[in-house]
Image (cartoon, rainbow, N blue to C red):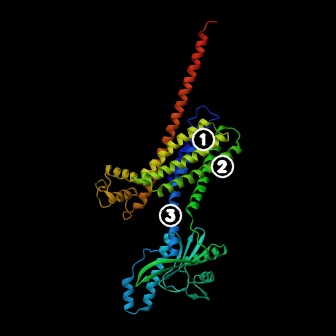
Amino acid sequence: MKTYLGTLLCLCFLSNSVFADTQSYENPFISKTEAIVFGISATTGFLIPLSSQKMQIAHQRIQFYTQANKSGVRLGIKNRRNEYKQLKDANNVNGKAKSIEKIGDAGARQYARRMGFKPIYQGKPGQGKGFDQVYRSGKKIVVVEAKGGKSPLKQYYGDRQGTAKYTLEVAKRTLKSPKATLAAKKAASEVIKAHKKGRLVIQTVRTKHILGKADPTLVRTTYGKLIVPSPLKIAHQSGLNGGLAGIGIAGAFELLTQLNSGQKVNWQKVGAMTILGGISVYSGTLTGTFIQRSLMNSQSRLLSTLAARKTATTLLSSVGGGLVGGVVFSYGAYLLGYGDLKTANRSMVSSIASYGSWALGGAALGGGAGLTFASGLAGMIGATASTGTAIGSLSGAAAANATLAWLGGGTLASGGGGVAAGTTVLAGISATGVGLLAVGVGAGVMYFFHLSDEGTEHERVEHLLSNVQTHLNKPL
């Protein structure tokens, strides 16, 4: 996001200083169409890796959820074998029951984490009546009944656990209870609202065990329907988000151009360019996302031989998506009569060049080049780690952590921001560098076209003057 915002700010600066409408000025340094196409390509390229990553996560969650409902999934749950055996040998029935409840609670929490649920309330094992766990999944509110071993669904308040009636009764009693925590009351309120809007889902998550060692966790939905977003839906949603950004970019540049011209604003043209910008980013993002998805899933020999397969697929899909978005806008504007063919062709060339550098720079810095550079810089200026050791003498993870802590203003123990703050600083530095690289390459291509136009114009004027001189020297 920082790279995209930085690039957009650079474009806004260029728009106020050096770009013009090709229909109003002679040989502008950067035309309005070129600037918009560059912004659209950058936006598209920013969204494609994020969208592809979300699609991959969605695909994994669908597989996980399907298996959890069908045969169960093995999760990282603490082995309580020794604890359970000791309780069993001591014939401690209550202790065994509590140990089993802990297994069930851990299984439910692990399941929710793997599904990407956002916790609203998580109770304690063995609390009896009340909510076990309540989560948010998109617009859905998911109430989880955590069960361990063969523990049955119990009946309280006249209804069985896992039913809507029981869940609503628990919610109402929680809101009235003076002992309920704020988190529990918030969960109760969310459950009641979700039920009224048809967004309530109730699931039982059971983790069986063998002498305290967890077996696969099995999930059953007892009320409502949990919708796991499909990869196609995520790609579509990312495209829509990108479309909104494209609307803002194209509309802003078109309106700014017309205001700078001093003439009356043509709102019909502003509207047409705005819609075209949205369609361009949507189509580019959708195309690039599926390109990357296909390449990452491909078992082709070409990609399997590449040392940096992820970097290569990100580059190819980002350039491909940016190309599609740029083509749609450039030639769409030409077909609508808002630009000439030469400008459309040049827009595509400059867009591909600038975004190619954007993708390469982003992939390189994302692959660790940025951290390597920062570590080298820290070594050159003699920066030291918290232990007093020079960062330049360290290597591997020690050098990386020391560098990040240095960028973050020192370790947490010394009052600095630590590795987390350093990571944020490094991301900002890398994003700025990539944005400047992309703008520089795009501007260089545009300047090359500008010089070419000047040279052509100079030759035309010289040829014209030569013809005039020739005619003047002819005798009457």
From the viewer's perspective, tell me whether residue 408 is left or right of residue 33: left
- Height in image: 76 above or below 323? below
> Which quarter of the rendered picture does the C terminus lie within?
top right
Q: Which structural element holds mark 1?
A: helix
Q: Which residue is mark 1?
A: 33
Asked whether the residues under the numbered discs 2 and 3 touch, taking CB atoms below 8 Å apart as contact, a structural biologist would say no
Amino acid type of the residue tagged 1 in the rendering? Thr
Q: Give the number of the disc on residue 275.
A: 2
Please indicate, yes or no, whether residue 125 appears anywhere in the rendered image. Answer: yes
Of discs 2 and 3, which sits in the foreground? Answer: 3
- Height in image: 301 above or below 72? above
Disc on the earlier residue, 2 or 1: 1
Q: Nearer the viewer, residue 410 or 331?
A: 331
- Height in image: 143 above or below 269? below
From the viewer's perspective, tell me whether residue 287 is left or right of residue 207: right
Q: Which structural element holds mark 2?
A: helix
Please indicate, yes or no, whether residue 416 appears anywhere in the rendered image. Answer: no
Residue with the most extreme bottom position? 91
Q: Quadrant of residue 460?
A: top right
**Category of crowding for the residue at label 1, using alpha-carbon neighbours closer than 10 angstroms: few (below 14), some (14–19), many (at least 20):** many
